[in-house]
């Protein structure tokens, strides 16, 4: 379960960090062009990150609820990993597609360690 715990915590903090860096460097033009859509998107990703972190810390504490919450969090993450790449693919930025694909594979391994 250590693998799943580390995965949840690292990815949760990583998602929050990625959005903070993007915001601070002005790399979210949709805040001006599509504020409602991107607002909902960011909210969904922050919810995913927070549930990942919560599940990771619950797993770290050995709480049984951590396993169930981890499965929910990874499901949320998978949705993000399927929907978000379209934005980058539209721009021809294929590096992000590789990262999202890797997260799905690594997440599946995390599920295997949980169940």
Image (cartoon, rainbow, N blue to C red):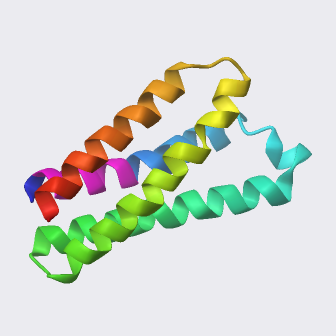
Q: Which residue is depicted at the point 90% across and 44% down?
A: 33
Q: Is residue 25 visible?
A: no
**Res 27 → quadrant:** top right
Quadrant (top left/top right/bottom left/bottom right) for the C terminus: bottom left
In the image, taking residue 78 as reference, residue 36 lies left or right, namely right
In the image, taking residue 9 as reference, residue 34 lies left or right, namely right
Q: Which residue is depicted at the point 64% across and 56% down?
A: 42
Q: Which residues are magenta?
A: 3-12
Residue nearest the observer in this picture, 47 or 84:
84
**In the rendered image of this protein, does residue 63 appear above or below residue 9?**
below
In the image, taking residue 61 as reference, residue 23 lies left or right, namely right
Quadrant (top left/top right/bottom left/bottom right) for the N terminus: bottom left
Q: Where is residue 19 shown, x and y percent of the image?
A: 57, 46
Residue nearest the observer in this picture, 93 or 53:
93
Q: Is residue 88 magenta?
A: no
Q: Where is residue 97 shown, x and y percent of the image?
A: 51, 28
Q: Which residue is depicted at the point 20% across and 72% down?
A: 67
């Amino acid at each position: 379960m250590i693998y799943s715990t580390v995965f949840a915590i690292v990815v949760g903090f990583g998602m929050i960090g990625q959005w903070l860096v993007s915001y601070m460097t002005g790399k979210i033009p949709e805040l001006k062009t599509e504020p409602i859509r991107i607002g909902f998107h960011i909210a969904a990703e922050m919810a995913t990150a927070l549930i990942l972190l919560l599940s990771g810390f619950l797993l770290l504490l050995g709480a049984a609820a951590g396993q169930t919450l981890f499965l929910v969090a990874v499901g949320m993450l998978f949705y993000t990993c399927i929907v978000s790449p379209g934005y980058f693919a539209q721009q021809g930025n294929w590096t992000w597609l590789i990262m999202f694909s890797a997260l799905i594979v690594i997440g599946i391994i995390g599920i295997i360690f949980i169940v």
